[in-house]
Image (cartoon, grey):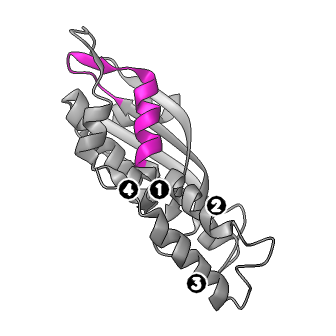
């Protein structure tokens, strides 16, 4: 596990405030570098862990489950930060489907995995791939599908400034990639 260097973050935020031609010593900004460092440690917690470490953390399954039926966990709310602008990706919604191969994961673990993976500097496309990779390690199945939709402040609040624009991505493997009916069953459930 890597640790986040909050001392460097505080110093850097102070420098940014000075570069913006504000006074980091004035009343309203005096504690801002410390608050931002604390916030960054929280919202970027996932950067401290590899996908393998996340899989180890949440590798709690129910074994010997006799089912080949589709399991869906939908509408998991997450947020992340775009690695291009450090801008917030918000109103994000993750839906996960998989076909068990002898074991199923506790449902809250799916949400915890999605949450921790999103707490990195990310691309929305990579969030889905990272969740899938972690679940493959835990579940031992390739039959996984992830759909994510969300808004990106780098597009809604700056640049082209198009509020309400939604980005949808999917990560698909195993039977979901080759079986259109299975893929459609997942989409109809979410």
Residue under label 4, please give it: 47
| Dot 4 and dot 1 residues touching (CB under 8 Å) | yes
Asked which secondary structure carries label 1, the reply is loop
Who's the residue at 48% across and 67% down the image? 7
Query: CA separation, marks 2 and 4?
Result: 19 Å
Would residue 63 be seen by someone viewing this image from the given angle? yes
x and y percentages locating residue 159 in the rendered image: 64, 81
- 1 or 2: mark nearer the eye: 2
Question: How dense is the environment of label 2, judged by Cα within 10 Å: few (below 14), some, or many (20 and up)?
Answer: some
Q: Which mark is residue 53?
A: none
Q: Please report contact status of discs 2 and 4: CB closer than 8 Å, yes or no.
A: no
Q: Nearer the viewer, residue 103 or 6?
A: 6
Front residue of 155/116: it is 116
Q: What residue sits right under mark 3 in the picture?
A: 15
- Which residue corresponds to mark 2? 35
Position of 145 relative to 58 (above/below): below
Mark 3 and mark 1 lie on one chain; the one further toward the N terminus is: 3
In the image, is residue 21 above or below residue 31? below
Q: Residue at x 65, y 63 (%)?
A: 165
């Amino acid at each position: 596990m890597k640790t986040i260097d909050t001392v460097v973050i505080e110093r850097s935020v102070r420098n940014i405030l000075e570069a913006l031609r504000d006074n980091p010593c004035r009343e309203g900004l005096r504690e801002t570098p410390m608050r931002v460092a604390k916030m960054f440690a929280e919202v970027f917690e996932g950067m401290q862990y590899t996908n393998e470490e996340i899989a180890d953390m949440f590798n709690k399954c129910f074994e010997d489950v006799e089912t080949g039926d589709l399991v869906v966990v939908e509408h998991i709310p997450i947020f992340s930060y775009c690695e291009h602008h450090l801008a917030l990706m918000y109103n994000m919604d993750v839906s996960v489907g998989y076909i068990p191969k002898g074991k199923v994961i506790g449902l809250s673990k799916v949400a915890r995995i999605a949450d921790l993976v999103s707490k990195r500097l990310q691309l929305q496309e990579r969030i889905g791939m990272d969740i899938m990779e972690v679940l493959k390690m835990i579940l031992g199945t390739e039959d996984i599908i992830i759909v994510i939709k969300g808004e990106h402040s780098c597009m809604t609040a700056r640049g082209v400034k198009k509020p309400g624009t939604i980005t949808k991505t999917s990560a698909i493997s195993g039977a979901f990639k080759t079986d259109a009916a299975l893929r459609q069953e997942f989409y109809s459930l979410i």
